[in-house]
Amino acid sequence: MDTAFTSWVYTILDFLAAVFVVLLGLGLVAVVVIYIIDVTQTKQAIRRNYPVIGRFRYLFEHMGEFFRQYFFAMDREELPFNRAERSWVYRAAKNVDRTLAFGSTRDLRPPGSVYFVNCAYPTRDEDAVATSPVTIGPYCEQPYITSSLINISGMSYGALSKPAVQALSYGAKKVGCWLNTGEGGLSPYHLEGGCDIVFQIGTAKFGIRDESGHISDERLRKVADHPEVKMFEIKLSQGAKPGKGGILPGAKVTKEVATIRAVEIGKDAISPNRHPEIVDADGLLDMIARIRKVSGKPVGFKAVIGDTDWLEDFFRLVRVRGIESAPDFITVDGAEGGSGAAPKPLLDYMGLPIAESLPEVVDLLRGYGLRERVKVIASGKMIVPSGVAWALCMGADFVASARGFMFSLGCIQAMQCNKNTCPTGIATHNPKLQRGLNSDLKSVRVDNYVTNLLYDVGLIAHACGVLEPRELRRTHARVVGDSGRSFSLEKLYPTVASGSKCATTE
């Protein structure tokens, strides 16, 4: 019996040795083939000069971003979102402990650092009040009244997967915030959860376009007939790519996406870089009036701010036409905004950051006596409580986030959104990758994220001595200057008297 067992063991070893020799031989053949390919090709100098070995350079370059994210970058170093920010969102979404021990790892000394001014007699928990309801579109047939402070910014079906949109829809319904469709049109998955919807009208008019690519009043009316659709947002530009329309790579244009958008399957869906009907302030006001008349619902626009001259022209015209002609809201997107696909020159260098653009817009509205009429939505990397509180101090009525909600769904910042290879199933239409995203579970995390974000913003507000977050003002925050000393945001951006510009323009 021992002899038989020994014979069996030797047989197995002989087989493994043979397999090893075959694999080694195949490996050597592969190395020879790769060597010949590398020394004969002329496109890449490194591969030609260092055949086979030179290929490792491209492997290391590809893997470098992953190693930096998990092993080398400090908690507050990484961009676009560092580990400390992502960790807070993950914990908030999972509704686990968000407290820390020993002390903060945030350096308060660099110029531009913002912190809040605590009150000697903070608001007691029992004295705090819920966020007050806000009416958007008082001159509309169907104004939108909401208490929601933090909402889901534009993310199209197509850019996001079916289970991701479903999770956002159900989660938004649970927590009572709105969901912006993005410029890709209204999908059944946006409506599935029954949440409030903001329909975004991009330059390609997806979902409401006629055969020539212009707005169809009939299709617009059909969208507005959905009771879930509460507002319409005209997208002039977005933070990641001002001056460029939407870019949906062909790999993500499935049959269903193509049907919703009225484009060809498998081909890149590229939106125009602007609305051809809007060439000046008159054109923008005309489009706002048309959409409002057809839909009966509030209409505003979203824009990245560069210079403010065009806004001054626009607000002056509003004063001429009458205050009812004004947009019902303006979404201010900062240059730090994100996107599934954007050209690097626009992503890195175009547009003003939200820190500059938000107070500019708020102050212009005040100066023209339009601040109460036009609500302001701030968008651009505000995924943690400090960012939301800062925006409220600056004068925003609402905050909208896209990537914060992606993190709540489990996004790991793999930077694969434009390749249809998102490992978490959020930004891909690959069924195998989507399988890992449980929309029921993730909808709960959307709910948790908003609930805990609101709670922690409330902590800041109460520490500042106000009863609810919307009472925060510029005097409640300070910013570090070049000298290392801080000064009030009110000093940096003095509050403009309401109607002060009207006296000089009318």
Image (cartoon, rainbow, N blue to C red):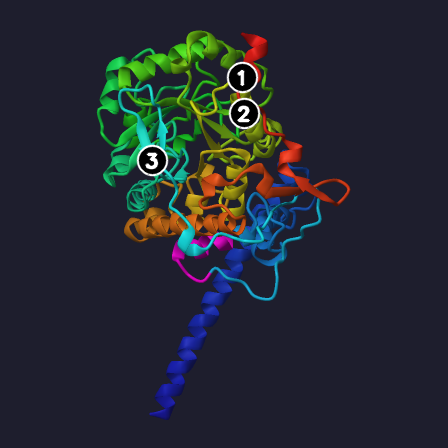
> Does the magenta portion include 90?
yes
Specify whether 269 is left or right of 465: left
Q: What's the distance in space between the residues labelled 3 and 2, CA to CA?
A: 22 Å
Q: What's the distance in space between the residues labelled 3 and 1, CA to CA?
A: 26 Å
Above or below: residue 95 compared with residue 34:
below
- Do we see residue 369 in this rendering? yes
The type of residue carrying mark 3 is Thr
Task: Say the numbered circle drawn on residue 146.
Answer: 3
Q: Position of residue 230 (x, y in %)?
A: 30, 29
Q: Tell whether label 1 touches label 3 (CB within 8 Å).
A: no
Residue at screen point 59% across, 32% down: 353
Instruction: Give, as a single range, the part of the protein colored magenta.
Output: 86-97
Q: Position of residue 39 (x, y in %)?
A: 65, 41
Residue pushed farthest right? 483
The type of residue carrying mark 2 is Val
Residue at screen point 38% across, 41% down: 428
Task: Say the numbered circle drawn on residue 311.
Answer: 1
Upstream in the sequence, badge 3 or badge 2?
3
The type of residue carrying mark 1 is Leu
Q: Tell whether label 2 touches label 3 (CB within 8 Å).
A: no
Camera-side residue: 266 or 94?
A: 94
How packed is label 3: few (under 14 Cα within 10 Å), some, or many (20 or more)?
A: some
Residue at screen point 72% across, 40% down: 481
- Do we see residue 243 in this rendering? no
Q: Position of residue 499 (x, y in %)?
A: 53, 18
How packed is label 2: few (under 14 Cα within 10 Å), some, or many (20 or more)?
A: many
Q: Tell whether label 1 touches label 2 (CB within 8 Å).
A: yes
Camera-side residue: 406 or 269?
A: 406
Numbered disc in front, either 3 or 1: 3
Secondary-structure class at tag 2: helix
Q: What's the distance in space between the residues labelled 2 and 1, CA to CA?
A: 8 Å
